[in-house]
Amino acid sequence: MGKGELIINIRNMKKGIFIAVILLIIIIAGVLALTRGSENKTANQNTNSFVNSANTNTRLNANTDSQSEDAVRIFNITGESYAFSVKEIRVKKGDLVRINFSSNGGMHDWNIDEFNASTILVDDGDSDFVEFTASKTGTFEYYCSVENHRSMGMVGKLIVE
């Protein structure tokens, strides 16, 4: 094999390695996208499974005598144009609280600082959830942390009795 042929073979080998690396990156990105899509689908299924028949437009109260003390208090909240679909949540101290959060119009999240609980930022039609223990009594503000959403009124109250 001559020097010219060796140089051409090395160049072809470099091209082959480059193409293999690009294909590997594409495959990894595809797997990650499928995994994230599966998580969103699961979260959407969970959200749809936990429909609460209480007054979901302004207030939800999780205190019901028919639920056991160890039950998870589940609330379905939607982030909309500078507002949450649920303005007030009531639970008892020690309750495990699950917020099934979805977005309907824009990107939003759900946060409550006192319990170090927050969802990821979700886009229109997507959802996420967060669970935390209501470990202290009081009235606490939950909010959307996107840009000026909080100052525009995208807030609600968690009341722990």
Image: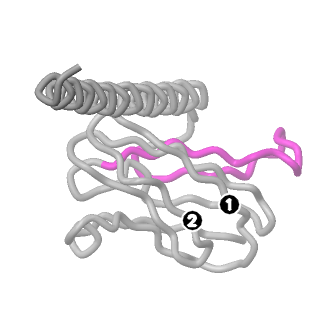
- Between 68 and 148, the one lying in front of the other is 148
Q: Residue furthest right?
A: 69
Mark 2 element type: strand
Dot 1 surroundings within 10 Å: few (below 14), some, or many (20 or more)? some
Q: Is residue 148 magenta?
A: no
- Give above or below for 89 relative to 77: below
Q: Position of residue 61 (x, y in %)?
A: 62, 52
Left or right of 79 on screen, residue 64: right
Tell me the amino acid under the disc marked 2: Ala
Q: Nearer the viewer, residue 93 or 109?
A: 109
View extreme (left): residue: 4
Q: Which residue is mark 1?
A: 132
In depth, the one of 140 and 12 nearer the eye is: 12
Which stretch appears magenta?
Answer: 57-79
- Residue 66 magenta: yes
| Label 2 Cα neighbours within 10 Å, binned few <14 / some 14-19 / many ≥20 | some
**Image quarter of the N terminus:** top left
Labels in figure, total? 2
Q: Picture quarter containing residue 134?
A: bottom right
Name the disc covering residue 1, or none: none
Look at the picture and state if 14 lies above or below 149.
above
Which image quadrant: the C terminus?
Answer: bottom right
Residue at x 46%, y 68% (from the top left corner): 142
Identify the residue shown where x is 48% and y is 55%: 119
**Mark 2 / mark 1, whichever is N-terminal:** 2
Q: How is the image coloured?
A: one colour
Kindly identify which residue carries mark 2. 117
Element carrying mark 1? strand
Q: Which residue is depicted at the point 27% across and 64% down? A: 146
Amino acid type, callout 1: Phe
Residue 159, quarter of the rendered image: bottom right
